[in-house]
Image (cartoon, rainbow, N blue to C red):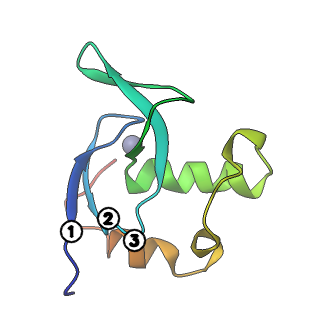
């Protein structure tokens, strides 16, 4: 893999993860007391693979809160492209 990986703290669960900054799924959130809280007016912050999988389930079921998503999310290999292969020691 030649892309630059973004290392971040998940805005949803606080787990550290790595992803492609171009493709990573993000949610609007803000920092409050050292952790992220969802905020519709906040900056978009990346979320981890585990949370992204759950978010995608909600997107596919038509959650109206999650409508502004890129069409790449609907591609079957999205997670491997965005997050790479899951590391052997990665346990969400
Ligand atoms: Zn997470």
Q: Quadrant of residue 33?
A: top left
Image location (x, y in percent) of residue 2? 19, 87
Q: Which residue is mark 2?
A: 21
Tell us which disc is closer to us: 3 or 2. Answer: 2
| Residue found 58% across the figure and 75% down from its top | 72
Q: Which residue is mark 1?
A: 5
Q: Report the label total.
A: 3
Q: Viewer-proximal residue, 55 or 24?
A: 24
Instruction: Please tell me whether mark 2 sits on a helix, a strand or a loop.
Output: loop
Instruction: Please tell me whether mark 3 sits on a helix, a strand or a loop.
Output: helix
Does 66 sit above or below residue 60?
above
**Rendered-image quadrant of the N terminus:** bottom left
Is disc 1 in contact with disc 2, using a CB cutoff of under 8 Å? yes
Instruction: Please tell me whether mark 1 sits on a helix, a strand or a loop.
Output: loop
Task: Count residues near mark 1 (Cα–Cα under 10 Å), then give few for <14, some for 14-19, many for 20+.
Answer: some
Where ligand 1 lies, by quadrant?
Answer: top left
Image location (x, y in percent) of residue 49? 40, 57
Task: Count residues near mark 3 (Cα–Cα under 10 Å), then give few for <14, some for 14-19, many for 20+.
Answer: many
| Residue found 37% across the figure and 51% down from its top | 48
Image location (x, y in percent) of residue 59? 70, 53
Residue 82 bears which disc, if any? 3
């Amino acid at each position: 893999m030649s892309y630059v990986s973004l290392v971040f703290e998940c805005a949803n669960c606080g787990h550290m993860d790595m992803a492609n900054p171009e493709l990573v799924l993000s949610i609007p959130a803000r920092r409050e007391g050292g952790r992220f809280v969802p905020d519709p007016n906040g900056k978009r912050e990346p979320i981890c693979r585990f949370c992204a999988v759950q978010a995608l389930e909600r997107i596919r079921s038509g959650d109206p809160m999650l409508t502004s998503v890129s069409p790449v999310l609907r591609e079957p290999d999205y997670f491997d492209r965005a997050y790479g292969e899951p590391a052997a020691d990665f346990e969400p």
